[in-house]
Image (cartoon, rainbow, N blue to C red):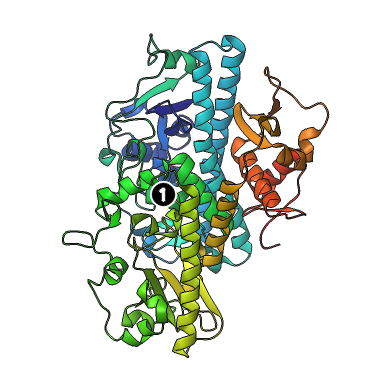
Amino acid sequence: MLWMAYGFLEGENLFETAGLTVDLRSYRDASPSLWAELKRCFRKDEGDEMQHHLLELPKDAELGGEMMPLARLLTGGSEPCANTTETGAKTPTREDLALELKARRLVISWLRQALEESRAAEEKLKVERGEEEPWRSARRLLQLERPVLQLELDVSERFCSEGSEALEGDFEAFAQRTWQRDSGWMGSSSRRVAAAHRAPRRNRRAWRFGAVGPGAAMVKAMDAENGRVHVAEGQSNKEWLPQSGYGGTGGLKAHLAQRVPVLRDAAAFREVRRILREDYGGPRALLAELRTQGFVENSRLATGEGAPFNLFARLADGQMQQPGMEEEQAALKDYGQIFCICKNRPENDEKWQSEDAEWLGKASMAARHRFLTTKDLRWNFFNALTMGMTDDDDVVGGLSESIQLLGQLKAAAMTYASKMGTWSEKLGLFFHVYGHNSVNSLHLHLVDMNFLGPTFKKLDYKNCPLSAVLEVLQDELAMATRPPRAPEDVIDLNVAGELLSVSAATFAAAKGLRAPGRLRDAQGRLFLDLPVVLVREILDALRLHGLRGHVGPLKLRLVDEDRQAVADVLGLTLESPET
């Protein structure tokens, strides 16, 4: 049985959150002690009538959510119903990972069942109700729910795949990348929030989809005059609520980190920009979050009295100075007029070789580690994520300006390292993209790659090279300046009920699409009964593949069994970037 919550209907990204119920009835007789713990932790107000527990995604999959605590409890893990559990303070073992994998596999079974039920409900509506309203809109809601579930499924499957390999292989490297001392395994919470402390779910409508199908529930919210679902009070279409997200489901920064937990190459950077634009309202939503938090005033990073402490912005604005940096600033030569060189705390520099847990992730990443920030405090330059994203429609101008800035940053860094005389010729240049950043103002990490410390390995999952950022922006500029194609050069595909458009060239490159006997929908469009998220990801890679004039296999950030299966249908060969 599925539960779903909606806040709005209009626009391209209609779906707000998705939910599923976990059937708890089988645990009642199997283990009286477990049943008592379930009631105590998750349903203090429902006594013996508890049968299901509602999980709302993505909120309950995030830090402080209920999905992983419930899964751990049901699979025999230690997830007591205290307000806080300091399990994250210890160093994880292989036994801890084995227990976590059991819980994650249970979550995978929940999500797969939810996706199957969603598709079955949609098909039932299509057969029994046809294309008339409100049934067609009800089917659309079901279609828009599935990407939320699919994304959580992808995260869990990726964790299980890599975690299973780590049990037999390099466990320490996996733990360094996915274990957080204060929150446990990445993407889940080791701190249990008691049911009594759950935040109320306001500003949304929720319905239970039972045997009568979702269409019947949807009728309750249909406007008799215009056939649209009512928008919840206080929300507008595509409105991102600063600091709390859509309908209070978590801040944008936390969402991006969960959606892209490893961000160290062009593919991941491209994906996080797509997610911001398509799923979370684009740069205006992010601007609203930063303004609410006080980091931006009007369209400029705030550095005045009362603003949150923002180190690099204050240094760039001249409101603060780091002692002993005059010589290093002079090493920038003419670039010193537009950039500012900054340093870490002295103790962080001193501990660059330390492997102590106290310093891992906090110490400098190398014997020589500096930061380069821009004196241009316009908000869209606060982080690599928003480079080229402007408040107006000048996409080409915004991308061109950002590409120029990246070139200047690289030239300034090379000039600095050369003039200082103590740096090796192997210079690493990295950004920490929003979601994984610690300071909300632009800072390029300059790292001497010949003298790396343990913290570099600790933070490797989020060290995104400048070259990767530049590659993505150059690709976007090439797409933005490409002459528009004639209508006959565009082909529409029906992918699990969602419309995707491709150029004739992209269609021709996916040879599997031209295989005889392919299904077609009522409008004559090619129909693919495949996960739309995976099809879109592979088609995007194919578009860029052709744009760059590449030949041979497509390179994807992650190549697993599911993606390869979809690629086989499309007639494509995949390989990972490491291949």
Residue at the spot x=38%, y=38% of the render?
38
- Coordinates of residue 482 in the picture (x, y in percent): 62, 46
The quarter of the displayed image where residue 17 is located: top left
Local crowd at mark 1 within 10 Å, few (<14), some, or many (≥20)?
A: some
- Coordinates of residue 481 in the picture (x, y in percent): 58, 48
Q: Does residue 372 lie above or below 557 as drawn?
A: below
Q: Give the residue number, with chain letter if any, for mark 1.
A: 390
Q: Residue furthest bottom?
A: 421
Q: Secondary structure at mark 1?
A: loop
The quarter of the displayed image where residue 335 is located: bottom left
The quarter of the displayed image where residue 326 is located: bottom left
Residue 5 shown left or right of residue 127 in the figure: left
Residue at the spot x=37%, y=71% of the render?
338
What residue type is disc 1 on?
Thr
Q: Residue furthest left?
A: 305
Residue at the spot x=67%, y=63% of the render?
578
Q: Which of the image's four quarters has the C terminus?
A: bottom right
Residue 243 shown left or right of residue 16 in the figure: left
Q: Does residue 398 lie above or below 211 as drawn?
A: below
For the residue pair 109 and 244, the one nearer the viewer reads as 244
